[in-house]
Amino acid sequence: MSIASRVGLRLEPRVENPRWMNWVVPIGSFLTALLVGAVLLLITSQNPISVYQRILERGFLDSGSLSGTFISATPLLFTGLCAAVAFRVGFFNIGGEGQFYVGAVFASGIALALGADAQSWIAVGAMVLAGAVGGAFWAFIPGILRARFRTNEIITSLMLNYVAGIGATYLIFESDSFWRELGGTGAVFPKGKIIPLTAQWPSFNLGSLVVPFGLVLGALIAVWLHVLQKRTRFGYEMRVVGGAPSTARYAGMRPSRVIVSVAMISGALAGLGGAADVGNFRHVLDPKGLQQSGFGYAGIVVAALARLNPLAVVFVAIILGGITNAGYALQGPDFPAGLVGTLQGLILFCTLGGEVLVRYRIINTRRQVRAVAAS
Amino acid sequence: MTTDVDSKAAIAPAVAAFGISKRFPGVIANDDVNFDVRVGEVHALLGENGAGKTTLSNVLTGLYRPDAGHLEMAGQRVSFDSPRAAIDAGIGMVHQHFRLIPTFTVAENIALGAPMVGEGRLMRMSNIEERIAELGEQFELRVDPTARIWQLSVGEQQRVEILKVLYRNATTLIMDEPTAVLTPLEADALTATMRSLTRQGRSVIFISHKLGEVLSVADRITVLRQGRSVATMDAAGSTRESLANVMVGREVERVQRRGTGALPGAPVVLDVHDLSSDGDRGLAALRSVSFSVRGGEVVAVAGVAGNGQRELVEVLAGLRPRTSGQIDVDGEVMDRADARHPIRMGVAYVPQDRLGTGLAPDLSIAENLVLKRYRRPPVARPPFLRSSVINAEADELMERFDVRAPSSQTPTRRLSGGNVQKVLLAREMSGNPKVLVVSTPTQGLDIGAVATVHQLLLDAAASGVGVLLVSEDLDEVLALADRIIVMYEGGITGVVDAQDATVASIGMLMGGGQSSEEVA
Ligand SMILES: Nc1ncnc2c1ncn2[C@@H]1O[C@H](COP(=O)(O)OP(=O)(O)OP(=O)(O)O)[C@@H](O)[C@H]1O
Ligand SMILES: [Mg+2]
């Protein structure tokens, strides 16, 4: 007898999936995470209400806070879209992380190569393109491997994250590469070259609100993806290939081609995130900073919480971005360090738990045993 | 346990349903269903596609909880929260789509997830194998417990499914269209098993659309109509006609080919010459097959499943490469092994696996209807799809082909078997094909739907389409075909004019023209 049956609970696959679950479950998961977080706070004798209130204020309500939130949300938006679009066709791209790095490497490379004399719009456009190409290239590898040799993309794309991370580190810390600043303090402390001012991405000021170009680009792409999936021939192919591969073949579609294309779109999105990270915020290739952030992995949480809907990804990215941003702003003796990380972990955990609830229902075996005993 | 049942259990039915109702969005699948299964009987459930038979089985096996009503077993009220609860209580489902792990042995598959036999926590394979052999002996279910699933025929795999529920001590077995996938010989073996089960005090709930089969094996029959149980009667004294009448509420006429052969002066629309191809395991499965089909003609391919028919239709549909041979469609050479090519040349194809190959089950009826036309105008305005056109065409086709569903936006997996097939035929026939290749088109369909599909095929032929009908059902073949091609071990053993054909003469050719050394 297994532990679960001794406890009296068991999971059974659901046969029917009511529609309301699409939004009730993610919201429920999110609230559950907050609730569990509140318990943790109580245990550490903090007042959860005041902590959450401060997160709300510093993440969204205080003047200027939303601008900071947008900065934190931008990379999550891109990596969230990256995961959402790939998972839709059953291509489990865990490689958003590595594709993000490669995008950053390509984008910073092109910005440095164009130099300070390039016109701003050309430099920014070139970075957008280079980031997308870099990410697409990195995702093409697991895509083609799966299409040709049926390798498992979860493993290959995950492994490539390490390759990309080590590669980027090599460029700055272990070689005299084109990306590395060799003059000034760079001779002593390894760091990347700052991209020229003309290549730095603009931000739009709406009154006191500052909206980075990267976020606008990401939101536009989310709309584009939504239209692509819902209204175009390619989106139709994606749906058929994702749900019924042998039917796709029967209808004359080429499932491998669709999957490789989607893999590349997915990678391009993460790569764009890397480009935005360099162009809008860091202005430099910073492998250590990138690896610490883990945007690629966080994107999977965003996509799951958004239930793979590109438009929902925008909102989820902003909410999670707000929590991250509040974490930065509130760091200090009176704010529990690590709370934000813990909270994000809880959100991931509860989201996965919520997905389990979508697919399975929980059964009380005790009741059942009685029912059988009665017979 | 069966010889000395106490008097109460002898009177109380093994399983009884009282007022069971189950609703789905937009449909009442079961509506106040009452019926009971006696100990030691085969109880057949009959009804048109969508009448609610599978839903009722799912209620009995704990997959669905009824919205109203209750179940009793041996006179005691029971309720099941899950399939496990039902099997613990003794109700087991023999799934039509086998849930077996191909690389595991028979014994491993059966032991998987079953409670341990005997004391201790170690699983002793030899004990399990012994028990399976015993059960096999007891119920005429011969299968080698150490064989691996992928080595078994479809009929043998089904025996494993039955053994699986018997191993869990099921006293009532539900079989949902078990014979749909069997050859006639295998179906006979299943009948013997059912008899042996009931002789030994087990009960069987048997679902089938084949009235002959139902009449020969069932003790009693309950008919469902639009979710309601309309009658329960003894099989003795019932006839096909009387059953059909109760099921459908009207006479169902069998469709019979009346015209003879191709239309006068009709061209050859499909010419297959010296075609060979390999099967899934890389062995030659189709050997130098040659034949032709003229416009307006219905040519049937008869044969026991697994004699190259699947490979033949897949090569024609561009889904399987050929190793040699030539195919001409309406005078044009089909030279690329690619599914798009035959579609463009006018070869329509209704595959045997309707939901797995022919349709995308999660997509709506409307979306499935444009599966082969989504690339071009008027459906597409590249790169976009025009949903207004798609929906308008769907409404029109659903009307024309009498597809019954809540709306054109319903996912196809929600449809009953007959309606699934109508969606497929609607799509394939609306593309103005020159050749229509259909594989076992009426498997799992109710008698009314069979008649509709047969009529649709004949209508297609009458409009000049060359129809290639692959079927194991000789009644169907004889009713529809102008000519009959018989396949055996990948080759053609004979081509017979339908007028001269008899079940016996074709059966003989199906066995290779020799004495039957058939594998069951
Ligand atoms: N999960 C579901 N969600 C919505 N509707 C369903 C579901 N399952 C069945 N239905 C509907 O309930 C009705 C009864 O379906 P059911 O599968 O029980 O019929 P059936 O008698 O088994 O038909 P068939 O002979 O074609 O197998 C049909 O109208 C079907 O579309
Ligand atoms: Mg059914």
Image (spheres, helix red, strand yellow):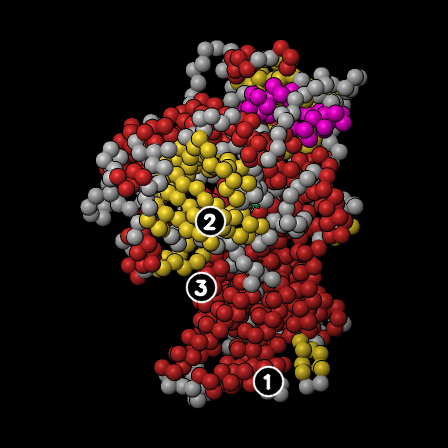
Q: Position of residue A112 (x, y in %)?
A: 66, 70
User: Which residue sits at x=57%, y=21%?
Assistant: B475
Residue A4 seen anywhere in this rendered image of the structure: no
**What residue is pinned by disc 3?**
A353
Q: Which residue lies furthest to the left in this view?
A: B119
Tell which subunit mark 2 falls on: B
Crowding at mark 3 (Cα within 10 Å: few <14, some 14-19, many 20+): some
Q: Residue at x 26, y 39 (%)?
A: B7
**Labels 1 & 3 near each other (Cβ < 8 A):** no
Which of the pair B197/B360 is nearer the observer? Answer: B197
Q: Mark 1: which secondary structure?
A: helix
Q: Name the residue under label 2.
A: B20
Judge from the rendering whether residue A121 lies leftward or rightward of residue B108; answer left or right.
right
Within-10-Å neighbours for mark 2: few <14, some 14–19, many 20+: many
SS at badge 2: strand
Up-down: is B265 above or below B383?
above
For the residue marked with disc 3, what is the amino acid?
Gly
Residue denoted by label 1 = A61
Report the mark closest to the observer, 1 or 2: 2
Mark 1 surroundings within 10 Å by alpha-carbon count, few (fewer than 14), some (14 through 19), many (20 or more) = few
Q: Say if labels 2 and 3 share a chain.
A: no
Residue A114 to residue B125: above or below = below
